[in-house]
Image (tube, rainbow, N blue to C red):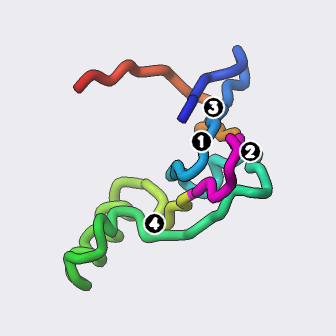
Amino acid sequence: MNCKIVGYEYKTLEVTLAPGESFYAERGSIVYVDEALQRDVEFNGSGSGNGGLGSLLGGVLKSALSGESILIIRFYNPTNTERKMVLSGSCCALVPIRLQG
């Protein structure tokens, strides 16, 4: 997966998915998606799905109370070539943060 922030005033995140890779995004953040990418809608905070109904409802409640979207979209590249998608944050406030570990 290759990600890069593009733009100055109106920043977008360009994500290139290699074959077999997935990327999760909230609805409303999507600017462009290659038509070959598959989309699945999931409940945000559902985890691995083996926690039962209580775990699912707890995750949905946490998402709703924290202001996050209850639904999240999983994009998957089933093709043999790289595919691109472009996302934008609310108010175009994308900031790169280097994660280690």
Q: Looking at the image, which residue sits at the far top?
A: 8
Q: Nearer the viewer, mark 4 or mark 3?
A: 3
Task: Name which residue type carries label 3.
Answer: Leu
Which of 77 and 100 lies nearest the eye of the viewer?
77
- Name the residue beneath numbered marker 4: 70
| Nearer the observer, 86 or 66 | 86
* Local SS, label 1: loop
Looking at the rendered structure, the kind of residue marked 2 is: Val
Question: Is residue 72 or residue 4 the one in the foreground?
Answer: 4
Q: Which mark is residue 31?
A: 2
- Magenta range is 75-85
Question: What residue does disc 3 label?
Answer: 13
Q: Residue at x 74, y 44 (%)?
A: 31
Q: Nearer the N terminus, badge 1 or badge 4?
A: 1
Residue name at image x 69 percent, y 21 percent: 6
Give how far across and how far down residue 8 sits, in percent: 70, 14
Look at the numbered discs 3 and 1 and tell me whether their residues touch, using CB distance below 8 Å: no
Which one is earlier in the sequence, the residue at label 2 or at label 3?
3
The amino acid marked with disc number 1 is Ala
Q: CA distance from mark 4 to mark 2?
A: 19 Å
Q: Position of residue 68 (x, y in %)?
A: 44, 55
- Asked if residue 33 lies left or right of residue 22, the reply is right
